[in-house]
Amino acid sequence: LAEVRESLDGIEAELKPVLETPWETLVADLEPAQKAKLSLIVAYAADSLFYMYIKTQGIATEDHPVTEELARIKNYMKKLKDAAGEGEKQQARLKLNKEAASRFITAGLS
């Protein structure tokens, strides 16, 4: 039990700067995808801590709503990751097309 308290104190110390900063300030300079990622991370961290708490209280977690919530957040994390990957692919295609267009223009001018 002492180790758990020590671990929680460590987590609290790590999260203190984030917890003391207003949410609007935290997300003010972030892109929409970064805001979504931060929101998901915070939600997952909170739900994970609650999951660990109910587990330590001897409450069955298999059918508990927090388990479903964790799965839902994981699903959104996957969707966000997939969307970010698709955006990178699209940017690579645009870059490739830009280079091809440059070659066509150069060839047409010569």
Image (spheres, rainbow, N blue to C red):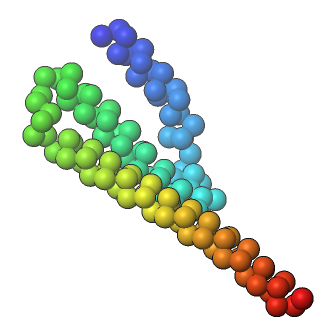
Residue 56, horizontal then vertical, whole percent: 21, 21
Residue 97, horizontal then vertical, whole percent: 66, 76
Residue 1 is left or right of residue 35, and the answer is: left
| 96 to 59, vertically: above or below | below
- The residue positioned farthest toward the top in the image shown: 2
Q: Nearer the viewer, residue 56 or 40?
A: 40
Quadrant for the N terminus in the image: top left
- State how many labels appear: 0
Residue 42, horizontal then vertical, whole percent: 42, 45
Residue shown at the point (48%, 50%) measured from the top left:
38
Q: Is residue 32 visible?
A: no
Quadrant for the C terminus in the image: bottom right
Q: Is residue 106 visible?
A: yes
The quadrant in which residue 27 appears is bottom right
Residue 66 is left or right of residue 21, and the answer is: left
Residue shown at the point (20%, 41%) measured from the top left:
67
Residue shown at the point (12%, 36%) measured from the top left:
62
| 54 to 86, vertically: above or below | above
Q: Nearer the viewer, residue 31 or 7?
A: 31
| 63 to 95, vertically: above or below | above
